Image (tube, helix red, strand yellow):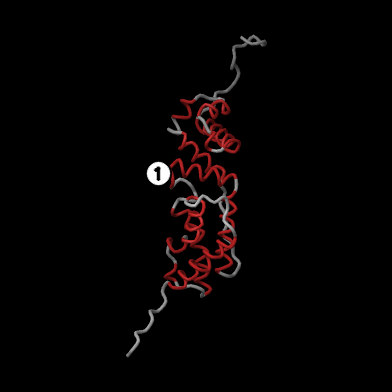
Amino acid sequence: MNDSGKPPGAGRTRRRGASLEEAILRAAVDEMLESGYAGLTMDKVAARAGTNKNAIYRRWPSRLALGVAAYRQLVTAVQPPDTGDLRGDVLEMLRGANRHWSSPLGAILRELMSAAGGAQEFLTQLPEQSGDAAAAAWLTVLGRAVARGEASPEALHPRVATVAVVLLRNEFVVRGVPTAPDDVLVEIVDEVYLPLVRGRGSAPAPDVVK
């Protein structure tokens, strides 16, 4: 009994369904923003959400599954730039990705990717790693370039479109840099991306007649 003469919890509506899931995800988001994925625990999330661990495990069977779901709540869709020039658009896209990967939110993403390892069922749930989601903005940028005559329609391939951001991601994931210098981004664009795009669909060099 408490001072009001009612048993603890009396008069409180027990959350269920979407309301409980929202509370759990909000708690997981707050925990990751405070402590990163490394500091995320089911106990802490349950306490913050005012529920028990069983309620969490019924929805997300592992800490990683919960972490990925919480991260998705934090990420907002980014509209691709339109500078009127393919080089300018690609540089802006890379600079935005670089800022994200260098931010506290990007650190959480790197933790989640490391924890997932090669588990594609988790990696494909991350917006930056989902093939369709990752390629959409880049294909938009490349499609505009094709419409302007800067590239051939043969360049419109997901692997071609996303090669620049894949190379940038390797700077963080493989080399472990905290941020990529701007000259690295320029090098990716000028030495790899633009030559690749411009080479797609171009006519082969004529045979030399001796």
Q: Amino acid at mark 1?
A: Glu
Q: Quadrant for the C terminus, please.
A: bottom left
Tell me if residue 193 comes above or below residue 5 in the rendering: below
Residue 83 in which image quadrant: bottom right
Q: Quadrant for the N terminus, please.
A: top right
Looking at the image, residue 65 sits to the left or right of residue 85; the answer is left
Which residue sits at x=38%, y=79%? 204
Residue 73 in which image quadrant: top right
Q: Residues within 10 Å of mark 1 (few under 14, many from 20)?
A: few
Looking at the image, residue 3 sits to the left or right of residue 159; the answer is right
Q: Position of residue 112 (x, y in %)?
A: 49, 42
Q: Position of residue 200 (x, y in %)?
A: 42, 72
Q: Position of residue 52 (x, y in %)?
A: 51, 24
Q: In the current view of this chain or complex, which residue is farthest to the left?
A: 210
**Where is mark 1, residue-wise?**
121
Q: As rendered, which of 33 and 1 lies closer to the eye? A: 33
